[in-house]
Amino acid sequence: MGEPECVEPRGVPQVGGGRERGLPEEEPEEHGESEVYDAEVRQVDVLNRLAGPASGGPGAGSDQAPPRTSHRDTDVLVTGHALAGVASLGEALTLIAQLADATFPLSGQAVFRSDREMLHCVGRFGLSEHAADTFRLPLRADHPAAQVARTGRPVVLTSSQEYRDRFPAAPAYADRERYEAWAFLPLTTYGQLTGVWMAAFDAAVEMTGGIGTFLVTLARLLGRCIEQTYDGEADHALSQSLRSSMGRIGPGPEGLTVTARYVPTGGGLMVGGDWFDSITLPNGRLGLVIGDVQGHDVPAAGLMSQLRTAIHAYAAEGHGPDAVLVRASHFLASLGEGRFATCIYLEADPETGTLRIARAGHPHPVLRLPDGTCLLKHVRGGLPLGLDLGEDDYPVSVVTLRENEILMLCTDGLIESGGHDMYSGWLRVRGALTPGGPDDIGGMADRLLNAVVAPQATQPGDRPVTSFTEDDIALLLLRRDPRDDHADGPGRNLRFTLEQDQAQGIADARIEFQGLLHDWARPEQVDTALLLVSELLGNVLIHTEQAAVLRADISGAEGHRRLRVEVSDRSDEVPARRAPGELSSSGRGLVLLDLLAHRWNLRPEPEGKTVWFELDEDGPEEP
């Protein structure tokens, strides 16, 4: 047998509308899904009648051996399962050819598809070069394949002589001198008659009973396989187009460096609902967006493409981050698809490093400090896009990047894949993001992805187990580049602003502050620092009407470091030490500072005041 060859069509042409082309009245206009089973039963009956006595049909002598059918059911099950996983028509024909045996002497195959006027051979197996390579036949032609395409009924030819007698004008594309019998069966895909399968046999074969049913079942499986192949090709083309457009991210303006990565889901598509984008804004600013549309299928990819385009357009018009997300949410809801999307959109100023960030139900960014310390940077947010619940509040958070600091934006696939939850996944991300310097931002992105999708050994000495992603992964890294050789050193600091309406932000500040001290040598001092920070922030929210600004800096060599924390507000009211009673709920802030801090004080400012304290890593034990 020869190697399978295929010429795949570019579309899914349909045979139908015969009356418009003046074809015989018996040509069906279309075959609905509800008619497929009845049509197959009729095809078996037609095969039995067409085969006749010459091939062991109803009029044959009783001394002829019946066809072997004992393994046909198993063959159908095994072949059907295998056909469900093929990627091309050639692979499908190869699988069917493996069913050939003495009672089923299948030797050649061809699949014919049609456009409105012509019949084309799009796949073959076991046929000689001249038998199918140039096959192009008008649907009106006197040919068995054309007749099947017109009528939807199978054609059985039990000998070369019958072939000549019934189709004298037919070209010899089916090797009439080489084969002994042929069966031409209709192929139904997408609920319509869309093609013809030719099975050619190099020995006489009984076309009735079990063989007839077997052929009809194979034609049905082949039709479904072709439908699946075309769906896969369409999905693949869409995925390639979307992924190609998403890969064209700009390098960023002078002073900022951007890198991005995308990993598709393990489900087979090259792109799903995750996306990122880079947008050039007025006044030299840069817009970055990352998002995730609900679902991991082609409809999610289509919605992603539309939403990505809409956000790009709103941002290019000059709208702020909050207005961009409000408009995007209304746009997604107006599509009526019943899906939502999470998203982060930010504007970056390369001159100052200021980032204005709006978040819609998306995971928080991660801030990598110059020394490799990683903090989960909590920013205010609203509901996911598209929910249309009448809440259009997407507050804008302001974050300032120091030189050599890197902000990471990602979709939840990077965090939660491989059975991880948000906490354990965050630890994995932190472990991959921390090593190395800030200069190789591309290597940092690759290291993050390798931590998720690269083969890993579960135990020392075990063979690596190849990982896969249950969800798409989109990743953006934004670095503020150093201006000169005197860039900020690898010091560690934290800036956090807490507004009066953000009482829940104290918990976020504690999480970020704890990340800042993740490698502090004395855990009891970390607890002390968290307590003091909570007290100072709470005092501002309770006793003033101003926002609290937290600044924390760590200096010195490891093991001998100093932590300095400052909390400022614009209120002129100076805190005073009190002697709170046993049941008092307040008044302990300065007492705690005096007891637990190594140094502390209050500093008046031109507007407001600052309360500060210091802790030494190698300082005295707490009282």
Image: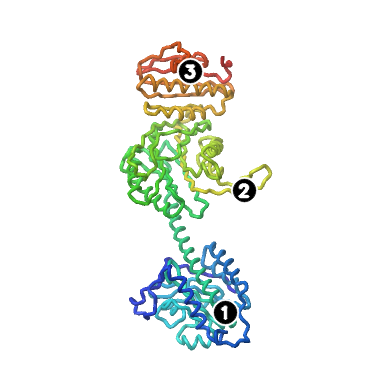
Which numbered disc flags the more N-terminal residue, 3 or 2? 2
Q: Quadrant of residue 127?
A: bottom right
Would you name the residue on which mark 2 appears? 465
Would you name the residue on which mark 1 appears? 201
Q: Is residue 390 left or right of residue 597?
A: left
Q: Nearer the viewer, residue 522 or 28?
A: 28
Would you name the residue on which mark 3 appears? 613
Q: Quadrant location of the C terminus?
A: top right
Which amino acid does the dot numbered 1 rest on?
Phe
At mark 2, the secondary structure is: loop
Q: Quadrant of residue 118?
A: bottom left
Residue at 58%, 83% (x, y): give it.
204
| Residue 423 in sight from this viewpoint | yes
| Residue 490 in sight from this viewpoint | no
Place of residue 585 in the rendered image (x, y in percent of width and height, measured from the top left):
44, 18
Which amino acid does the dot numbered 3 rest on?
Phe
The answer to the question of whether label 3 and label 2 lie on touching residues, with beta carbons closer than 8 A, is no
315 relative to 34, above or below: above
1 or 3: mark nearer the eye: 1
Which numbered disc flags the more N-terminal residue, 1 or 3? 1
Task: Work out which residue is located at the far right of the displayed protein and give it.
Answer: 461
Label 2 crowding class (10 Å Cα cut-off): few <14, some 14-19, many 20+? few
Distance in Å between CA atoms under marks 1 and 3 = 92 Å
69 relative to 234, above or below: below
Place of residue 187 in the rendered image (x, y in percent of width and height, measured from the top left):
47, 72
Label 1 crowding class (10 Å Cα cut-off): few <14, some 14-19, many 20+? many
Distance in Å between CA atoms under marks 3 and 2 = 49 Å
At mark 1, the secondary structure is: strand
Q: Nearer the viewer, residue 362 or 247?
A: 362
Which numbered disc flags the more N-terminal residue, 1 or 2? 1
82 relative to 183, above or below: above
